[in-house]
Amino acid sequence: MIIKAQYKQKIEILENELHSCLIATRNPEKVDDRLNKALSVISNLSLLYQSSSVEAKRKIISSIYPENLEFTGIDYRTNRVNSILSSISLISNRLYDLNNEKMIKKQLIPVW
């Protein structure tokens, strides 16, 4: 019963914090500003990384690879990649594939 009471209290605290966060983010202008800033950072990530300090570079890498990044001696590996950046990568790859398909089709069409 003591454990149940402790967790009930923690749940109530977390629910109150969640409610406060929801109220704070209901302002659409704040959401738009944050979204625009996030998209700007993501689109300029390579420039940001190159011009950052070592500590900032570590934060960038840990935001991309939220779980441990391991060096195996030859390659790097991780258990999980940030889902947003993973989705962006998939979209970029698909756009690249579509562009290549268009270029191949143009090359196959004879010019008279």
Image (tube, rainbow, N blue to C red):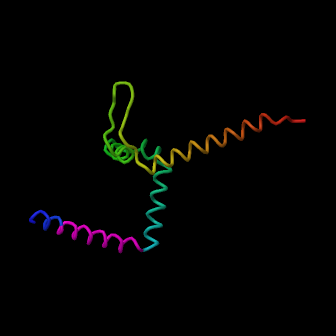
Residue at 46% from the left image edge and 66% from the top image edge: 33
Answer with left or right where residue 58 lies relative to residue 34: left
Residue at 38% from the left image edge and 25% from the top image edge: 74
Residue at 59% from the left image edge and 44% from the top image edge: 94
Residue that sits furthest to the left in the current view:
2
Answer with left or right where residue 8 lies relative to residue 104: left
Given residues 11 and 16, the one toward you in this image is 11
User: Where's the C terminus, which quadrant?
Assistant: top right
- The percent coordinates of residue 86 (x first, y second) are 46, 46
User: Where's the N terminus, which quadrant?
Assistant: bottom left
Residue at 49% from the left image edge and 61% from the top image edge: 36
Magenta stretch: dominant SS?
Answer: helix
**Which image quadrant is residue 11 in?**
bottom left
- The percent coordinates of residue 63 (x first, y second) are 37, 48
Within the magenta stretch, is there residue 22? yes
**Which image quadrant is residue 16 in?**
bottom left
When the figure is inspected, residue 96 is found, relative to residue 39, above or below; the finding is: above
Please give the range of residues in magenta: 8-26
**Which image quadrant is residue 7 in?**
bottom left
Residue that sits furthest to the front in the current view:
1
When the figure is inspected, residue 17 is found, relative to residue 75, above or below; the finding is: below
